[in-house]
Image (spheres, rainbow, N blue to C red):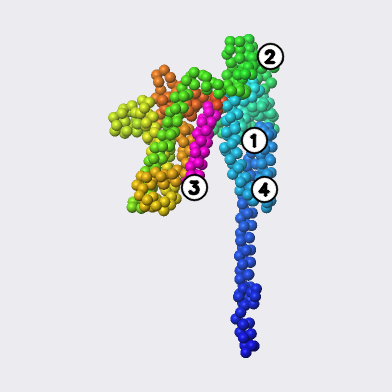
Amino acid sequence: MTTEVTGAGSASSPHPGSSGQAPDQRSRGGRRGEAEQVRRTRELSTGFIVSRIAVLGIVAALLIYALPPLIRTEAWTALVIVGVVTALVAYLYLTPRHIPAKYLVPGTIFLIAFAIVPIVLTFVTAFTNFGDGHRGTKEEAIRAIETSSVTQVPGSPEYYLTIAERDGELVFLLVDPATKAVQAGTAEGLTPVDGAEVSLTGKVLAAAGYTVIPTAQAAERDAEIAAFSVPTAGGAVKATGLSRAFEGKADKSYDAACDCVTSPSGGRWVADEVEGYFVNAEGEHLDQGWKVDVGFANFKKALTDPTISGHFLNVLIWNFVFAISAVATTFALGMIVALALHSPRVRGTRIYRAMLILPYAMPGFAMLLIWRDMFNTDFGLISKLFGVHDWLGTPTTARLGLIVINLWMGFPYMFLVITGALQAVPRELTDAARIDGASAWAGFRRVTLPLVLVALTPLLISSFGFNFNNFNNIKLVTNGGPYAVDNATVGATDLLISYTYRVAGFDSGVADFGFAAAISVFIFAIVATVSTVAFWRSRAQEEVYS
């Protein structure tokens, strides 16, 4: 009896510590688990290796692309920065440690390169006179003044000319008619070229290290070729057409003893390190200047120059009106449409939504031009429909027209994001409000709207920042107009960004980047202040409804 019980117990009861499975089942399960773990490890290892190869390949490609121009321009600081960053990235992705940094570093690099660096450069430029006529150093300005004053005199050496390129830079390949010697002329000077293949007419057919530009392509760069010159000991080499060049004499030359530019006719222009120009006794300056630090002069000009500061406040007020109206109207219309299609009783919502986002899917510049033509005085549809023949010719209707255009183009975006936010609002809250006796409006105002605003406040702030600098709408529809009869500098619909574009000289072709950067700093400060306050208020709102 005991033996039978013991035997039955041994057969039916698992041994303490066992899984209750037969040995072969446990071994098969263990083998499957080990195989699955090996497979996952292999997949992770493969993915990690592929990602490392991809990242390191991209970094190496960027390094190879960046090194030659940095070395050629002797930008040693930038070269050191690129080298250090490349070494850090290589170390990071070649070691199994620092896993979080592997995900953070790429985004951080792009943030610095595409956001922080442009902002810093804008601030730096705002304290200089950088612009047309002040783009380079003083040495470059002197060389440009001397070479631009070169004229051909009797007995000037002449050459057969072939237009070529080297490392993307324009080069004159010059053939001496008497000796057939070939020289390469660059912005730095002349260098001999050995082993060049020259035709009987003096044209260089091929030269090691240089790419000969066909005549048809050279003709398209005629203005660049005419402005190009090769400095020499006695003057400079200039082109006469596409096949001939001469070495002329410079009418103006720099004298380091007096830090001035002189001419044989008695002209004398002394360097003004404050303005970055060579100025004569009458106060006239040469066209070519150089970049200098001007301190707060650009900011002072924006605040004290009557032609600029006198209109700054009016433009700023309209700028706020336009940006706030753009956000408020697009949000209101987007909310109405989203609420209408959010109702479960509405059928065909997919079709309606697809139709409503069409304005958002169209190219913006094309839509702006179409809207401009719809407001046209002679044949515009809206002008004829409302009987207003000069819709864009009066300040009030022009501003109203811009707000309407922005509403049509901007509400689909608001509609999309509000639709997503409404779907995230729990229906239990709206049902509870309805059960408590709240009306539809009260439930929307006290439940739905606050929850939607918590989610969408960052998007509303970004929309305000975008519309505060909505250059395209102004430029393509009204170009800042209408303008007063006695003032063509500022228009009734100008925003700060379009006003800056005009007063900085971009329309006239003589751009003052330093002054434009100073105005951009003002705009940046305004938008940053508004955004900071709005984010602070939205954080308080999140704490209430969280």
Of marks 2 and 1, which one's residue comes earlier in the chain?
A: 1
- For numbered disc 2, what is the local secondary structure? loop
Q: Residues within 10 Å of mark 2 (few under 14, many from 20)?
A: few
User: In terms of depth relative to the viewer, which is nearer, 458 or 154?
Assistant: 458
- At label 3, counting other C-alpha atoms closer than 10 Å, the crowd grade (few under 14, some 14-19, many 20 or more) is few
Residue at which label 4 appears? 92
Query: What main secondary structure does the magenta stretch of the protein show?
Result: helix
Gap between marks 4 and 1 measured at Cα? 26 Å
Residue 14 picture location, percent across and down: 62, 77
| SS state under label 1 | helix
- The quadrant of the image that shows the N terminus is bottom right
Q: State how far apart marks 3 and 4 are (Cα).
A: 39 Å
Tag 4 and tag 1, C-beta contact below 8 Å: no
Q: CA distance from mark 3 to mark 1?
A: 53 Å
Q: Is residue 43 visible?
A: yes
Whether residue 345 is situated above or below residue 405 in the rendered picture: below
Q: Give the magenta range.
A: 519-545
Dot placed on the residue nearer the N-terminal end, 3 or 4: 4
Whether label 3 touches label 2, CB < 8 Å: no
Seen from the viewer's position, the closer of residues 532 and 209 is 532
Which residue does the numbered mark 1 point to in the structure image? 69
Q: Earlier in the sequence, mark 4 or mark 2?
A: 4
Q: Earlier in the sequence, mark 3 or mark 2?
A: 2
Residue drawn at point x = 61 percent, y = 20 percent: 276
**Residue sitting at x 66%, y 27%:** 188
Q: Amino acid at mark 4?
A: Leu
Q: Which residue is mark 2?
A: 258
